Amino acid sequence: MNGRRTSGVVAVAPAAPRPGTAVRSRLEAALWFAAPFVVLVLVWAAAVRLYGVPLRVFPAPPDVAEALVQQARTGALGNHVWQSLRRVFVGTTLAVLSSIPLGIAISTNRSLAALFTPILRFFSVLAGIAWIPLATLWFGYGFGAITFIIFNAVFFIVLYNTILGVTRIPQVLRDAARSLGANRRQVLTEVLLPGALPNIVTGIRTGMGFAWRGLIAAEIIATNAGLGYMLFLARDFYRTEVIVLGMVLIGAIWVLIDRLILAPIERRTIERWGLARIVT
Amino acid sequence: MRRRILLPLRSFFMQPAVQGLGPFVLLVIVWALVVELEVYPRAFFPGPLDVLRAFGSLVYKGILPTYLQDSVTRLAVGAGVGMLVGVPLGLLIGLHPASYRFFWPLIIFFQAIGDIAWLPILLIWFGFTLTTMTFVIVYTVIFPMIFNAALGVRTVPVEMIRAAQSLGASPWRILVEVLIPGALPNIITGLRNGLGYGWRALIAAEIIVGTSGIGFMMFDARRSGSVVEMILGMIVLGILWYVVDAGVLRPAERATIERWGLVRQVP
């Protein structure tokens, strides 16, 4: 079902029978999720000790924990994480706010949409990392260039997906809304936006995935703060424990953003407004 | 009379090649106009002709073909190795529930670390070599392959497996004749996604590791402040991806889906 129900009844995911069991099964799922990591850390610790791998090549888990405590105490770690998150947040927000209205404006005209689609595909392929050299030249090294990379990675993919989403809405639905007396604004807010929402959300998730990688690359090249910079600085001093700490943080932060924020939103919008589709 | 002129003209504009290329012609014209009007200083924003001239000179010097070959070879080797490792692993995870439970969280986490975050430690291990770059690309390609191969075998309808079983097929034959063909459309989709990521990883690796390749050319141009070569690099990257995606991957995806998959639309 693509149409939105206006009766005020919100389609919620089927409620669990009792709140207690839901919490317990959630906890169980979390434990199952965590278990392989425990195994991995144990194997890692055993392997490093068994083969006597030097710290210069690869750290043992305690070294990484020590690096975490040490970096957190000086406040350097907090600053790096904060800088990275701020750049992602600013870049993504700007991109989403500008690309969705533009996408809808373009896609209301079919020939305009046909004109823009190949160009947008081209730019969404180029998005992100390929812009690093040019961005550093235009904006200098620092916040501007990196935010531009993030913006760029998200903007074109969301724009492309918005147009795709709107043009895929069956004409019947628009005609139905119009014949029921909806004005242009109502068609926009009740048909076009909700209909394109699954595509838009998928676009945001994909775009942010690319943006997060692009961020790390950009921070390695073009700044003096952030997680990517932390990694590369540590490389200069062969501090492998700081490098591994940075990698674990990069992975963990992205898993949290993606699994706890983006994936549930995507699932909800698709369940609510989209056709049945599998969200991985 | 007018009709006779307009009709071929119209059919000319309706051709897919023209519809695909037309927007780009327009884009180049707009670009040239903006440059001619000197909205931005020319040193920061060169025109299409400058880029074309740079293209000519770099091809003449043999730099561009060599770098292009380096980049494409790296991508192909990385994709090949990634497929050889990723597909069997994906099949195992998709078919074996216990290994699914164990590996799935790890896969999600390691995919989230991302290719580029591996570069610093890879540089310590392998230095500025081809191994570093191959590792990065294999790493990126492998995860979408695993994801999609696992998804593919898990979505093969159970009736098909039972039908094959009841006709007396051995487990090996079920794997080769039912499960793998059933998962093939997903595997190709995985390859397409994986190459999309691997492609970006390659550019980043070439920029940072920097020995040769299109990414290196762009970053080298950054050092000497040659905007023309940066833009040329971007265009080459874009076109190359277009050729690989539209010329090889999408037809392969469409063919496998038509042959083995359920009716599905290829975006």
Image (cartoon, coloured by chain):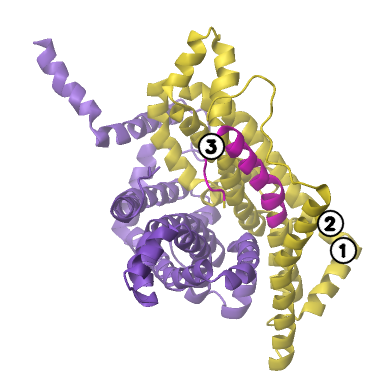
Would residue B224 be found to the left or right of residue B119 on screen?
left
Q: Quadrant of the N terminus of chain B?
A: top left
Mark seen at residue B212? none
For the point 67% across and 42% down, the residue is A144
Mark 1 and mark 2 in contact? Answer it, CB < 8 Å: yes
Q: Which mark is residue A72?
A: 1
User: Does the residue at mark 1 contact the one at mark 3 (Cβ under 8 Å)?
Assistant: no
Question: Label 2 is placed on what type of residue?
Answer: Gly
Image mark 3: chain: A
- Measure the alpha-carbon separation of dots 1 and 2: 6 Å
Report the disc number at residue A199. 3
Q: CA distance from mark 1 to mark 3?
A: 39 Å
Q: Which residues are magenta?
A: A255-279
- Residue A75 in sight: yes
SS of the residue under disc 2: helix
Q: Which mark is residue A78?
A: 2
